[in-house]
Image (tube, grey):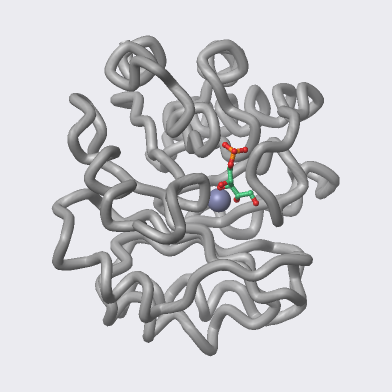
């Protein structure tokens, strides 16, 4: 699977998101942008809404990878997809019927992903593996950018990579949180192919070099 770096706009300039998006897009090799949506319930922070996605959409050709950290994502998937999300990832942890939501995301024309937090057992992903395009493993407790990478998640990456090769699934394995050139390489060696990078990307002095290191 072709490795991809998805800069996380959460670490961009919130007074000039369009410029941060342009910075990501101007970096050779960047095809995706990661957009974190937080509701103040499932995670203790707030970020963007569908209107942000809608406002950014005409400014970019990047693939919009939308990560819903919401207690009730089903209520919002339609709005996010209408406004420009191309992949929508939901978490297993909140209590709602996940499979119908995943199905609905695809019916609305987006690809779909399933995600677990660092403390959630990897087996919780199993019911969804035949119904998703992406498996997202959080490598920090979600809610804030700039946190320290959790090395204990590497074993989960190895587990899902083994499931993928044993059973012939073709979903991406994405990691999110504290991913920089060094921890990203650890994730890559464990089997990840899609790297969400917030702080590390926007702080990188040489963004082209940063991306090519992870994508090579
Ligand atoms: C964490 C978010 C991440 C965040 C990653 O709640 O899901 O996407 O933007 O930021 P860094 O790379 O700074 O850890
Ligand atoms: Zn995210």
Is residue 195 visible in the rendered structure shown here? yes
- Nearest the camera: 13 or 183? 13
User: Vertically, is 178 above or below 76?
Assistant: above
Q: Quadrant of ligand 1?
A: top right
Q: Residue furthest bottom?
A: 75
Residue located at (32% from left, 67% from top): 85
- Quadrant in which the C terminus is drawn: top left
Residue 88 appears left or right of 147: left
Residue located at (38% from left, 10% from top): 213
Residue 156 appears left or right of 28: right
Corner quadrant of residue 47: bottom right
Residue 171 in the image: state x and y as whole percent: 42, 42
Residue 124 appears left or right of 7: right
Corner quadrant of residue 206: top left
Q: Total of numbered circles in the picture?
A: 0
Residue 42 in the image: state x and y as whole percent: 75, 70
- Nearest the camera: 167 or 215? 215
Residue 84 in the image: state x and y as whole percent: 26, 70
Residue located at (56% from left, 36% from top): 175
- Nearest the camera: 136 or 203? 203
């Amino acid at each position: 699977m072709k490795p991809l770096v998805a800069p996380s706009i959460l670490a961009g300039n919130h007074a000039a998101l369009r410029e941060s998006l342009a910075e990501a897009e101007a970096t050779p090799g960047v095809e995706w942008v990661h957009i974190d949506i937080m509701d103040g319930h499932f995670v203790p922070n707030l970020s963007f809404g569908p209107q942000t996605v809608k406002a950014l959409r005409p400014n970019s050709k990047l693939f919009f990878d939308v990560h819903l950290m919401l207690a009730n994502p089903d209520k919002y998937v339609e709005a996010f997809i209408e406004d420009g999300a191309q992949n929508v990832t939901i978490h297993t942890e909140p209590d709602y019927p996940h499979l119908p939501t995943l199905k609905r995301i695809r019916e609305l024309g987006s690809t779909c992903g399933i995600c677990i937090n660092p403390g959630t057992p990897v087996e919780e992903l199993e019911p969804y593996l035949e119904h998703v395009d992406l498996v997202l493993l959080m490598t920090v407790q979600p809610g804030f950018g700039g946190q320290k990478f959790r090395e204990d998640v590497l074993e989960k990456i190895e587990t899902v990579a083994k499931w993928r090769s044993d059973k012939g699934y073709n979903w991406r394995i994405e990691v999110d949180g504290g991913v920089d050139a060094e921890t990203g390489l650890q994730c890559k060696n464990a089997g990840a192919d899609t790297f969400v990078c917030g702080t590390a990307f926007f702080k990188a002095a040489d963004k082209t070099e940063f991306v090519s290191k992870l994508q090579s």
